[in-house]
Amino acid sequence: MRSDTGRTDSLWMTTSPPLVLPPLAEDLRTDVAVIGAGIAGITTAYLLALEGRQVVVLEDGAVGGGETGRTTAHLSNALDDRYHVLERLHGEEGARLAAASHAAAIDRIEAIVGAEGIECDFRRLDGYLFVPPGQSLEVLDAEFEAARRAGLEVRMVPRAPVTSFDSGPCLLFPHQAQFHPLAYLNALVGAIQRRGGRIFGGAHVTGVEAGPPAAVTTEAAHTVTADFVVCATNTPVIDWLVIHSKQAPYRTFAIGARVPPATVPAALYWDTADPYHYVRLQGDLLIVGGEDHKTGQEDDGYDRFAYLESWTRERFPIGDVEYTWSGQVMEPVDGLGYIGRNPGDKGHVLVATGDSGHGMTHATIAGILLTDLILGRPNPWEALYDPSRKSLKSAAEYVKENVNVATQYLDYISPGEVRSVDEIRPGEGALVRQGLTKLAVHRDEHGALHSLSAVCTHLGCIVHWNSLEGTWDCPCHGSRFGIDGAVLNGPAVVGLEKKELERR
C-alpha cells in the first residue's frame, strides 16, 4: 500500500504510467477488503472477483507504486534461499511444495496473461545459476541434488550461454519467465473493475478491526466493512511485532544499461555471491540487481550502484547506465513467505508478506492461497506458508535478526551525527541531538531546514537518512518516511512528528 517514493524511478515506472484511482468518499460494505494495490493485493482481488466475490481495494498511492514497481521482475522457481537450505529448514516435502507453488505461480501468471489478452512482454526462458570466481562448486552440487528432489527439471551444464564471460559450470533451470510488472498490473486493474471490483486511491489505512465482520478505517475517517480483510502491503501495517520479529527488511539495488542487439542471450542469470546478483533483459536493456543491505543500516546507495556497474562491465558489453533504482524486500528467517491468517485475528484478517526476493511469484502464490482460504477450499500450501508457523531449525537466524534489532536502540544514547545543523548540506539529512531527544533534520535545496522527531512511530527505533532516495528509514523493521514525515512504507501507519529546532 505504501508508495515507495524517492529520488529514483525504475524502468517500469517510466514506461508504464501509474493509474489514477478515484478516492474513497464513503463508507462501504463488501465481501473482501484488500489493503494494497501491488501485485499481491491486485492478484488476490482479481482471483476473488473471478469467483464472484465483491472486492474493494484500498491503495495509499499509485497502483504498483510500492515494491511491485521496483522489482526486476524475475518469475522463477529457482529460489534465492536455495533448495538444500529449504530442505534442511522445511524437510523434503516442504521443499517440494515450495518448488511446486512457485512453478504454479508462473503458470497462473501465464494463464492470466492469455485469458485477459495482456500485453506485458511475458515470455518463457531458461535460468542459469553460477558461482563467482574462487567459490567452490560444492554449492552447485548440493543445489542440483536438492532441486531434483524437489521435483525440478534442473540440469548441470558446462557454462551459461554468454560469450562475454565464462560463467563456468552452472545449473540450468528451464521454464522460468519474465514480464513487465506494471503493464501486467494495470491490465489486471481493468479486469477487476469489469467484474464489479472497486479500487480506490489516496486511502491511507490507519486501523483494522478483526471482527467479524472486519472493518478497515482510513485517515479520511471512512470505513470499509467486510467478511474478510487481506493486508497485502509488502510488510503488514496491522501487526506490531509477531510477524515483524520473523523477517528483516533489506534495500536492494538495480541498474539498467543498453547492450548491442543479440550479444546477450535472453535468459535469467543469477550468481551465488553474498550479496548475490541477478540479471535479465528487457528488449536490449540489461537489468542487473543485487548488492542488498539492511534497511536503515547503511547509507551508501551510490556506491552500491557503482559496485553493480563494475560487476556488470566485467561480464557484459554494456553501454552507459540509463536507469538506477532501489527497492525493499522482506527476508523471512526460514526462507519462505508468510501467507495466510494473521496470527490472533480469528481467521477474518489475512496477510501476505516475506517475499524473500521473489515478490512476483510469492505474491501470486498469495493470491491463489488466500482466495482458497477465503472460499473455504483446501490448499496443499497452507501449512508451509502459515504466518503462525514456528521452526526450531531457523531459531538461530531468528535470534540473530532480533539481536540486530535490539542493538539499534543504542541510537538513543549515541551523539548526533553532526555538531551543528550548519554542517547539513542542501538536499541532505542528519540526526541532531537536542537535549534528551534526537531529531531528523533535512535541509532542502533552497536551504530551509525541516525538523522531525527521529523516533519511528512503529516501535520507537531511531530512523536514519537515506541519501539515495531522500527518505528517513527505520533500521529495525523497515518503515520509511518522507522529508515531511509522511509514511512511505509500513509497518508504521503514523508519520514522524514535526519538531521545533532549537538554534544555538
Image: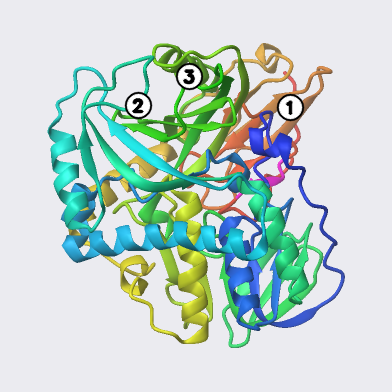
Q: Position of residue 278 (x, y in %)?
A: 42, 32
Q: Which residues are magenta?
A: 485-489
The residue to which callout 3 is attached is: 263
Is the residue marked by circle 1 packed among few (<14), some (14-19), or many (20+) residues within 10 Å?
A: few
Q: Is residue 190 left or right of residue 237?
A: right
How many marks do you count on the picture?
3
- Tell me residue 228's x, y (percent): 59, 80
The residue that disc 1 covers is 502
Query: Alpha-carbon distance for marks 3 and 2?
Result: 10 Å
Q: Is residue 148 left or right of residue 356?
A: left
Q: Residue at x 76, y 30 (%)?
A: 450
Secondary structure beneath dot 3 equals loop
**Kind of residue at badge 3:** Thr
Please tell me whether mark 2 sits on a helix, a strand or a loop: loop
Q: Tag on residue 161?
A: 2
Please name whichever residue, 319 or 116, is drawn nearer the observer in this view of the structure.
Answer: 116
